[in-house]
Image (spheres, rainbow, N blue to C red):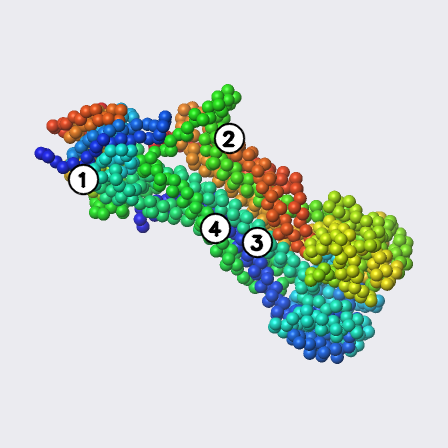
């Protein structure tokens, strides 16, 4: 090994703690990129494999009642690979000890036990005996949430008929990765069940002998989805077809796609910023380390080493740190990506995981680290090479202070000696101070942004569940019924206020853009569930036009004044042309509001209600739930508190958990930046500080000179960090938003306060660590070497 | 030594640092002949220009005007790369503060130079010349100042340079250790016939030189030729 390489290794060893701190920062920057890339690839690959293995349908076509022979006609449509007809319907489950009735979906299984499409994965228990009509399979998540096991039984009301079933198996199904009750936004395992029962039993219950009410279709390669959809719609139309839709509009799939989209967009926006900031820090640190080696560079040149040989030596040095950090980041990234994927496996309820790493993240992490380190070293080396070796070997000449005489006079009067030293150093090398300020501010900005995203989501929940929705619960009816039902609800003891609504499923279109959703028909001056504008003032619902949520208007690219086409998928299925009159500020979901009577008029169904928002006296809650459970018209009850909790869980356990991790990494990077700044300052000043100590300054005074500078830089970084953080939030907020919820890019004071506090704590802790080194300065050894 | 050839021929050498009002004239037209195989001592007060002269002779710094010839080659006309090769192949340096790499052992510090030289001594031989064979695996921090300086000399002579340039080699040492270092330099001069240039504050050092050059205010003030050199052991300061 050449002596230069030995020097390299020993220098690395000597600077191990600082090299480790730098490598750790770059490792974190790379880690989060590799982790997110691997996580998303794994989840997408797993989803694909799961869908494929369990033959999830490409098209879902619900109808009222279609004869089985129609399945042959559907199979004959061009582009259709396989067809399966099944019976599906709503149910209410009555669980002991649970007051609120639980909604469920029942699905038929063919006699063979395994359907051609939409198969299931048996987690526990056994398959159904096709000859028994009282055996069911139940969705694993729901069973777990309520402690149900194979061998137990459950009581359910299906199509008005209350029956008890034996649970024989717990299953997972790609169709229900997320179980979301109709009319709700967030999935909640405990409040929505899926039951698989024998086809014969359900045919009897729903009076569908020899018929089906949902066709599942898989497409052959290269098939045109729109063509198949319209072909199926044409065939099913005489049988009450409700409109076939593709997998993209299937509820569970939409959730998972949105979650993955949210993950992907937050991983394409945020981790590169982390990496960029880590790279910036690496650049600064490397350039300062190389700068501090100026005299050794001059010496090597004096011996006759060429610029190239010296440069190669220092490049090896910085590359060792950069690639070391990046490699560590890759390794840890793969590990944590696997760990995260396993967390997500539970969350998404995948029965298996297909691991897949993201090579681009490796390459990007490596390249960025190496480039940042090389550029940092290169700039300094070019500067040092320009000097003659004789000059380079001498310590840099003291700066010219003559220009700062006015300042010097001022500070002489106002400041004591150590303070003057702090100030002069800042003034003498303003670029150094500026780069340290920008570095710390960048770290703080990351933290501010992450905390703001978390805070914004909480304010979204507040806005949605306290301001927009002021009810305690909402009730939905089995089918749209007359106003009388509202009086029944009002009569229940403890009910304070009842506000009916009419909602219809519809496809909203604007030109080529369309969106499956629904129309909420509200009172013209609603109290309990309202539309609000940007200033959070209520918008009155109008009968001459529709109010769209911001998310929906954006998706359809429609503005107030333009006309929206509403393709209603219920009742007589009218197609309405309605002007958009206002845009509502909603952060959860994408509702469209219309006046209830106007909607009923358009449907030619006067006086109908689909459900009601209710305010109740919570002291009577249990009785009210029980009463509702007994009412045959009630299809489901949504308790607002539970819905809010479900959303909170969605944030904490799903894509949200990544946000917590990113926040933690942002905080660590911030600390890394602050600590490195302190360390470098110490390394550069060790000799000065020792000299001060020799002259007779106390340890405290010497520390003050060092940390005073860090203090000034930290304080200067705080306002800049706040501004950068706010700017960064504007960039990333949309990346964190999905179809389900929007993250507003609002100023979140708490986030700024907490981030500033974190920076101050990091500075104080770094100061403490560096102070120990000041206390331990070896005065004699410092003086033995040259001035 | 009837008419020995010249190691360096310096003519009208001028060096100005900075410009305008802050310009510093380090050298103001120096003329000097340094003979091959001799020990030349440069003396003068601080700021007299002796370090600047030595740095230019060593190819560590460039002149503002004038010329320096090393043999037939004109140093003042050399590019940066040519100067690098010149230093690598012909010049050995010894500095006041040794400038050893703290992270390398004595042996490795010497190896740093033998690595890039064309026909070097082995690091072991060079350490033997300065009498430090048994300290070869020690780090600078484990050695006394005199030992460190001897390692620096070993490092400088290992490449078998034609000239050895020493900037205050005893400046950081006590007189006893300093004498030992000077003795090593004298040995090197005698054993390897290397031309040696020594900068010093200590006037007594002039006694061991063939020629003592006195500099003042950037000019050569006087040159004293010693008919008889003293041994390093004989001088004191």
Disc number for residue A268: 3
**In the image shown, does A208 or A374 lie closer to the viewer?**
A374
View extreme (left): residue: B2
Q: Check contact, mark 2 vs mark 3: CB within 8 A.
A: no
Q: Is residue A305 left or right of residue A203?
A: left
Would residue A642 appear left or right of B49 to someone viewing this image?
A: right
**Residue plotted at (39% across, 30% down):** A398
Q: Which residue is mark 1?
A: B71
Residue A199 at x, y percent in the picture: 75, 74
Q: Residues within 10 Å of mark 4 (few under 14, many from 20)?
A: many
Between A653 and A48, the one nearer to me in the picture? A48
Report x, y in % for residue A144.
70, 60
- Nearer the observer, disc 2 or disc 1? 1
| Horizontal and vertical percent position of residue A656 | 64, 52
Q: Secondary structure at mark 3?
A: helix
Badge 1 density bin: few <14, some 14–19, many ≥20, Cα 10 Å: few
In depth, the one of A525 and A718 nearer the eye is A525
Discs 2 and 1 carry the same chain letter = no
> In whole angstroms, how far apart are the C-alphas of marks 2 and 4?
33 Å
- Labelled pair 3, 1 in contact (Cβ < 8 Å): no
């Amino acid at each position: 090994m050449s002596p230069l390489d030995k020097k390299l290794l020993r220098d690395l060893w000597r600077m191990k703690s600082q090299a480790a701190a730098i490598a750790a920062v770059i490792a974190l920057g790379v880690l989060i990129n590799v982790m997110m890339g691997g996580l998303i690839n794994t989840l997408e690959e797993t989803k694909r494999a799961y869908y494929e293995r369990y033959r999830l349908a490409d098209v879902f076509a619900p109808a009222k009642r279609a004869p089985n022979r129609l399945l042959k006609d559907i199979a004959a449509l061009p582009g259709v690979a396989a067809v399966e007809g099944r019976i599906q319907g709503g149910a209410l489950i009555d669980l002991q000890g649970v007051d609120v009735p639980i909604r469920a979906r029942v699905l038929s299984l063919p006699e063979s036990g395994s359907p051609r499409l939409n198969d299931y994965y048996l987690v526990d228990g056994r398959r159904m005996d096709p000859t028994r009509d009282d055996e069911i399979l139940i969705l694993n998540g729901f069973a777990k949430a309520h402690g149900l096991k194979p061998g137990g039984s459950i009581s359910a009301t299906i199509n008005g008929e209350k029956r008890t079933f034996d649970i024989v198996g717990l299953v997972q199904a790609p169709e229900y990765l997320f179980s979301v009750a109709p009319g709700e936004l967030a999935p909640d395992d405990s409040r929505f069940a899926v039951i698989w029962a024998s086809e014969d039993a359900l045919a009897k219950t729903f009076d569908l002998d020899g018929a089906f009410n949902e066709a599942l279709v898989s497409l052959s390669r290269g098939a045109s989805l729109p063509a198949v959809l319209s072909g199926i719609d044409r065939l099913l139309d005489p049988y009450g077809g409700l409109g076939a839709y593709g997998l993209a509009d299937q509820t569970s799939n939409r959730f998972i796609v949105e979650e993955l989209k949210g993950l992907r967009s937050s991983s394409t926006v945020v981790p590169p910023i982390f990496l960029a900031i880590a790279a910036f820090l690496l650049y600064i640190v490397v350039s300062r380390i190389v700068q501090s080696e100026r005299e050794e560079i001059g010496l090597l040149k004096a011996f006759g080493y060429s610029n190239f040989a010296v440069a190669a030596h220092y490049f090896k040095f910085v590359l060792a740190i950069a690639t070391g950090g990046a490699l560590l980041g890759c390794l840890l990234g793969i590990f944590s990506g696997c760990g995260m994927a396993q967390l997500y496996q539970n969350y998404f309820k995948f029965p298996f995981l297909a691991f897949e790493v993201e090579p681009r993240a490796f390459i990007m992490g490596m390249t960025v680290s190496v480039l940042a380190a090389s550029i940092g070293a290169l700039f300094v080396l070019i500067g040092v090479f320009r000097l003659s070796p004789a000059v380079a070997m001498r310590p840099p000449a003291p700066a010219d202070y003559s220009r700062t005489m006015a300042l010097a006079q001022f500070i002489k009067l106002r400041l004591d000696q150590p303070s003057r030293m702090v100030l002069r150093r800042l003034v003498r090398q303003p670029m150094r101070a500026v780069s340290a300020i920008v570095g710390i501010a960048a770290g703080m900005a990351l933290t501010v942004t992450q905390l703001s995203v978390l805070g914004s989501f909480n304010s979204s929940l507040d806005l949605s569940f306290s301001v927009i929705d002021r009810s305690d619960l909402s009730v939905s009816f089995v089918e749209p019924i007359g106003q009388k039902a509202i009086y029944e609800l009002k009569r229940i003891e403890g009910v304070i206020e009842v506000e009916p609504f009419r909602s219809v499923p519809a496809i909203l279109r604007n030109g080529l853009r369309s969106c499956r959703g629904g129309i909420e028909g509200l009172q013209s001056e609603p109290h309990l569930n309202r539309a609000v504008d940007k200033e959070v003032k209520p918008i009155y619902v109008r009968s001459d036009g529709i109010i769209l949520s911001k998310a929906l208007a954006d998706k359809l690219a429609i503005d107030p004044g333009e006309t929206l086409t509403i393709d209603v998928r219920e009742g007589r299925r009218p197609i309405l042309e309605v002007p958009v009159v206002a845009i509502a500020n909603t952060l959860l979901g994408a509702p469209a509001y219309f006046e209830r009577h106007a909607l009923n008029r358009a449907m030619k169904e006067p006086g109908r209600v689909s459900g009601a928002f209710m305010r109740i006296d919570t002291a009577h809650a249990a009785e009210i739930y029980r009463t509702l459970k007994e009412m045959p018209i009630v299809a489901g009850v949504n308790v607002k508190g539970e819905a809010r909790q479900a959303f909170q869980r969605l944030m904490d356990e799903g894509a949200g958990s990544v946000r917590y991790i990113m926040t933690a990494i942002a905080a660590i990077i911030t600390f890394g930046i602050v600590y490195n700044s302190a360390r470098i300052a110490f390394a550069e000043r060790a000799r000065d500080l020792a000299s001060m100590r020799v002259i007779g300054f106390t340890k405290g005074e010497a520390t003050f000179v060092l940390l005073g500078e860090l203090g000034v830089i930290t304080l200067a970084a705080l306002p800049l960090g706040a501004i950068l953080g706010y700017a960064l939030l504007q960039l990333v907020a949309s990346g964190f938003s999905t179809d389900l919820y929007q993250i507003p890019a609002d100023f979140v004071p708490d986030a700024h306060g907490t981030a500033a506090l974190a920076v101050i704590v990091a500075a104080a802790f770094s100061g403490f660590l560096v102070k120990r080194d000041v206390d331990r300065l070896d005065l004699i050894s410092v003086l033995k070497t040259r001035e | 030594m009837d008419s020995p050839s010249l190691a360096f021929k310096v003519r009208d050498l001028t060096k100005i640092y900075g410009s305008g009002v802050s310009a510093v004239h380090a050298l103001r037209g120096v003329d000097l002949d340094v003979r091959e195989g001799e020990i030349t001592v440069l003396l003068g007060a601080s700021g007299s220009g002796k370090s600047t002269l030595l740095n230019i002779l060593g190819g560590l710094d460039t002149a503002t005007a004038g010329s320096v010839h090393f043999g037939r080659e004109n140093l003042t006309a050399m590019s940066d790369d040519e100067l690098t090769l010149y230093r690598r192949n012909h010049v050995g340096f010894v500095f006041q503060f040794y400038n050893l790499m703290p992270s390398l052992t004595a042996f490795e510090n010497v190896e740093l130079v033998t690595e890039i030289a064309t026909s070097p001594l082995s690091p072991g031989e060079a350490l033997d010349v300065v009498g430090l064979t048994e300290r070869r695996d020690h780090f600078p921090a484990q050695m006394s100042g005199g030992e460190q300086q001897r390692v620096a000399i070993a490092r400088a002579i290992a490449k078998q340079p034609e000239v050895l340039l020493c900037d205050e080699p005893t400046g950081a040492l006590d007189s006893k250790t300093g004498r030992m270092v000077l003795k090593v330099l004298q040995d090197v001069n005698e054993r390897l016939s290397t031309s040696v240039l020594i900068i010093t504050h200590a006037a007594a050092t002039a006694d061991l030189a063939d020629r003592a050059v006195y500099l003042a205010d950037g000019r050569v003030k006087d040159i004293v030729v010693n008919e008889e050199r003293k041994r390093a052991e004989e001088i004191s300061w």
